[in-house]
Image: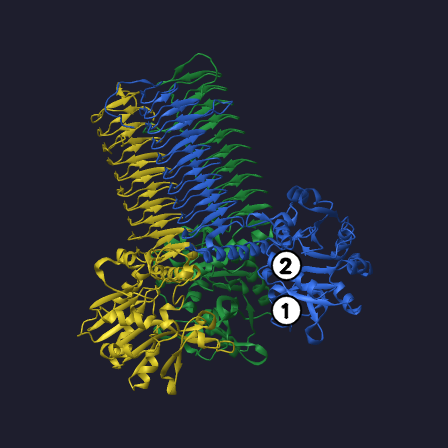
Chain colours: A blue, B yellow, C green
Amino acid sequence: MDGFSAILMAAGKGVRMRSSKPKVLHHIAGLSMIRHVVAAANHVAPEQTVVVVAPDNAEAIAGELGEDVEYAEQPEPLGTGHALQVALERVPAGTRHVLLLNGDMPLVTGTDLAALCHLHVDRAAALTLGYATLPLEQARDLGTLQRGARGKPIGVVEAAERDDRNGAPAMDAIVGAYAFDAAWVRGAVKRLSKHAQGELYVTDLVAMAVTEGRRVEAFEVASVRGCVGVNTRGQLANAEHAMQQRLREQAMAGGVTLIDPATVYIDATVRFGTDVVVKPNTTIGGASEIGNDVTLGPNAQVYDSIVGEGAVIGSAIVRASRIGAGAQVGPFSLLREGSELAAGAYVGAHAEIKASRIGAGTHVGHFSYVGDARVGDNANIGAGTVTCNYDGVNKHVTEIGDGAFIGSGSMLIAPLKIGKGALTGAGAVVREDVPDGGRVAGVPARAIASRSRQAG
Amino acid sequence: MDGFSAILMAAGKGVRMRSSKPKVLHHIAGLSMIRHVVAAANHVAPEQTVVVVAPDNAEAIAGELGEDVEYAEQPEPLGTGHALQVALERVPAGTRHVLLLNGDMPLVTGTDLAALCHLHVDRAAALTLGYATLPLEQARDLGTLQRGARGKPIGVVEAAERDDRNGAPAMDAIVGAYAFDAAWVRGAVKRLSKHAQGELYVTDLVAMAVTEGRRVEAFEVASVRGCVGVNTRGQLANAEHAMQQRLREQAMAGGVTLIDPATVYIDATVRFGTDVVVKPNTTIGGASEIGNDVTLGPNAQVYDSIVGEGAVIGSAIVRASRIGAGAQVGPFSLLREGSELAAGAYVGAHAEIKASRIGAGTHVGHFSYVGDARVGDNANIGAGTVTCNYDGVNKHVTEIGDGAFIGSGSMLIAPLKIGKGALTGAGAVVREDVPDGGRVAGVPARAIASRSRQAG
Amino acid sequence: MDGFSAILMAAGKGVRMRSSKPKVLHHIAGLSMIRHVVAAANHVAPEQTVVVVAPDNAEAIAGELGEDVEYAEQPEPLGTGHALQVALERVPAGTRHVLLLNGDMPLVTGTDLAALCHLHVDRAAALTLGYATLPLEQARDLGTLQRGARGKPIGVVEAAERDDRNGAPAMDAIVGAYAFDAAWVRGAVKRLSKHAQGELYVTDLVAMAVTEGRRVEAFEVASVRGCVGVNTRGQLANAEHAMQQRLREQAMAGGVTLIDPATVYIDATVRFGTDVVVKPNTTIGGASEIGNDVTLGPNAQVYDSIVGEGAVIGSAIVRASRIGAGAQVGPFSLLREGSELAAGAYVGAHAEIKASRIGAGTHVGHFSYVGDARVGDNANIGAGTVTCNYDGVNKHVTEIGDGAFIGSGSMLIAPLKIGKGALTGAGAVVREDVPDGGRVAGVPARAIASRSRQAG
């Protein structure tokens, strides 16, 4: 939308978190809270985004958000009104509207913010106030909307000034999302009165605008209902829970079966195909893409990985890897960064694979370590095989050709090249390359006569 | 009960599932939904069970249910009344009653259906209508029972024709379970009127029976309260959850402790003894039988296995195996199909056992692969041992005698026989049989002098 | 508080548990129920604690509680009044007050009991009755408080005598916690009338005291709201759930992030630092102490272990061990009793470590078994390494010096000493000590020329 500046308030200490980390940097569904809010604000395509930070968290927040946003430092914690004053100094003269958001509101959706801003512009309001209708229990610590004739907003009652003992079961709570006419608010913030400790409250702008005869609108920001703001670890858990519920419902609506939705953990950045089945206690994180007909879990963890159609990942862990169509990864196996399973590759139990390509139809069936390797198609890697890729100083590459048969307990001393169709005997310590069709055994391994295939 | 034919409607597409699989083949507690309904219907001992399928799911459903049931194909999706018409053509003339059920109703119990049928027969009703009293939220998409004088059922109001805005907090929703007088319903279905798209509704039979002065009864099918029908993945998850709650409560009532019932997943086919303790995030699936005083989990998965009294299975996976009394299976171990642990056998961490017998008191303490093996009693299998059972073409058997001591890192090249009380040195590659009491070491292994037992 | 004797009633059979174990010995958050109640009672510093047992559970309960408490045996199950009679025989003449508690009430807090006792003493009451205001559903099987003028307690209505059909939505249920004037109650219990089966009810003392003009007080024991008493496995699960909720909230309030609080399982004996992050499905048990900035899980299990600042424990299991600051333990690894990781030690995937010290900066990166070992700093233990610590009869120690490089697949036959900076080649079977800087390889291992470091 044209002419909007977004301002995010992130200066709060969050002392009730009992954390050495700035409150807005705590994570929800794999992203920091402030990133969720920045992403939601981006739905209104603001011309700038200004994040208000405090001296003691400026560096950490800048470390998280980098140069995608601008920063305004609030030198002292003098309230939301003061934070807005400080931020407005960075808003150019030509800006027509300001969207002001609390930084600890990870559940707010871009859809809600865009609707709030549209209402604001359409009605030519001086101020549009976001609220959510919440049960008393959740609204207890929040300011609430005061309405006048015909339900028009006329002010905000702070929680401390309110007596909830005989209150309604639900209240319209202020959530920390506002749109302002930029010209008006620039002047208005200077007219705010100080509260105790010299604080200025943004919420006082509502009554001010009404008094001045300016138009004030209210908009329900329904997306934050599960957790308006995060001030405690308990609220952090509530926000995580609400976000997970949202992500789980989205996945199910798109054709994913979650056997027990309550124990599937999905980052906001994950994409799913259809007819995926996710079994209990499974985490899918980072920029993962899960293809059609994939089965995950129970107890799977898949991070930043592409999983091809029909693949099956059991109680295994996959990080930053590519799993080909129809490939299988068995229980207690670990695929570390940079692994690639070709279509139909099979990794059984207790295997560890790192930065390696496993060819189509190749079996790594049992406990073993395959690191920095290029394994061809239809090869067999026996139990106990180790690619000895580390000499104490450097890492080296192992190449294994198509159809090779690596006997159990083989130690493959990299750099090493095992040819196509080659064989190593069980317990071989292989220090020298093996040609295509070659057969070696022993410690150290030496060529052996061609006979019936050696067990391994 | 005498004279009943059961008809199950399974033709629905379930487009909101976004699945390439027929809706009724999605699983609940380890069985397809249609199997649950067939099993429930079997409680009334029907003389036949007819499943109504559609052209595009007939094959898949027949693949699931086989020849236990008959099939009637509904060529076009012309509604439940039409499905009933099609099915009745397969019902023999002598049949006295028809039990008609939706196929996507996995929660319905045989107890409820038997009670419904008893009521139907006792009252000599033309039609007995199953309903469940549900909160408005759950009943919103369902037809509801219309009652006349003295609460008598007089018709069904379709959801689309109903205005729920000022409705009661709970409603008597139609669940898709009916008993009919066979003679009456054969004629009645032909008198049904077409709705939009030419559909015929079974529910119209209620008003028809009333108009014709026939007796109509209603029966509450309370068992479906958690999820009446499954049209979305969300409802599938709800049905799974409700079924799991039922299975968990049954287990607890029988003397099983579930530390966190919410994360124990039990297939409908599992049987438990008493004083079993199941720790969190544990799955017990298939035809498993868990003996008295067994401890499972956390993070255990036991499928299709018999677990003897007092056995302890930690964070391990057991498939299609037998675990003897007092045996222990440690964390990260995998027992694959066809494994058998004798009483008091011990499998520690990171072991993989496949199609092998492990004798009484034998220890497989550490990472190792034991496949296609017969291991005697009181043997010790060292860390890193591999039964090299695969030569690239065939699988071979390893036999290990009572009291044998297999040194760590031994490669046992099958087919192979290690005698009673025999010993293999650490790192031995054993290609030839070892006699009772024999001692071998080296690569390849050769007999060594009898001295103090070799470390291994 | 001065002059109190505590009496705990633990004679109940708990037949609905379907257990061979006494009811009060079932566990909640890692401790038996009776231990929780003893611990709560200890908050009032009683001069003695008498546990009333039955002939058939006396031995088991004494086995659990030992000599910390006294025992009174109730020969026949003649009710709570009779249990109190039996216990009072063990209470010395000089005792001024008696605190009587049900033994199956693990949720009761010492804070609540201390407050109840203070009220009792301050008001000079003959009897102070603990109750909890519960929804009808939970109160159904419990006696309820009968109040007279100005809300004064005048008696108890047993559940069987009560008609709940038109009852209030919440009731003041008797929870099984009472304080008595010792002198009065000694006489009063002898005046109790028998109910059916000859039972005496403690609850009848309320009306008796009122009738005799003695002061009676009531106190809400709010801590038991989640589960007043445990008579079924379902209630056991409810009590566990309520206790876990309490422990999770305490952890979060102290600065611990629980991503999904519902799947974190915490024993009552665990202590946490701040900025700990606990991922889903993680169990922290026994006397564990988790330092600041530690990350646990998902799927971690930590029992009886000290975890240093900033350590990261992934999907691993740690038992009775010490993890140094900044150490990492990777997935599928098992640290057994008596292991110690120095600061910055790294244990990767599939490692098993038992009763061993792993030095600072040392890597045990892959599948391996390290038992009874002392590994120096900055050493590297290759994949597949086994400390062959067991010779079939005894266990032996392996010592590995600082900076040693143990090649993959090395079998280290203990007792063995590998010197500082020494190297073993891949696949070496090492039977003899290796001096500082020595290099060995082969089967059995022999010294090799010093050349560029061998891959391993």
Expressed as whole percent of the image width and height from the top left, the position of residue B120 reads: 27, 78
Residue A220 shows in this picture:
yes
At x 43%, y 74%, the residue is: B159
Q: Is residue C402 left or right of residue B257?
A: right
Depth order, front residue of C57/C388: C388
Depth order, front residue of C229/B60: B60
Chain containing mark 1: A
Expressed as whole percent of the image width and height from the top left, the position of residue C393 reads: 32, 29
Expressed as whole percent of the image width and height from the top left, the position of residue B439 reads: 25, 23
Task: Give, as a three-letter code, the residue at label 1.
Answer: Met
Pick the quarter of the image with the N terminus of chain A: bottom right
- The residue carrying pointer 2 sits among few (fewer than 14), some (14 to 19) or many (20 or more) residues within 10 Å by Cα, namely some
Quadrant assignment, res A434: top left
Relative to B340, say whether B84 is above or below.
below
Furthest toward the left, the residue is B94
Depth order, front residue of C92/C278: C278
- The residue carrying pointer 1 sits among few (fewer than 14), some (14 to 19) or many (20 or more) residues within 10 Å by Cα, namely many
Depth order, front residue of C192/A38: A38
Task: Give, as a three-letter code, the residue at label 2.
Answer: Ala
The label shown at residue A171 is 1
Residue C354 shows in this picture:
no
Relative to C331, say whether C357 is above or below.
above
Relative to B269, say whether C431 is above or below.
above
Quadrant assignment, res B82: bottom left
Furthest toward the top, the residue is C449
Of the residues under marks 1 and 2, which one precedes in the sequence? 2
Q: Is residue A99 left or right of residue C239?
A: right
Task: Identify residue for label 2.
Answer: A114
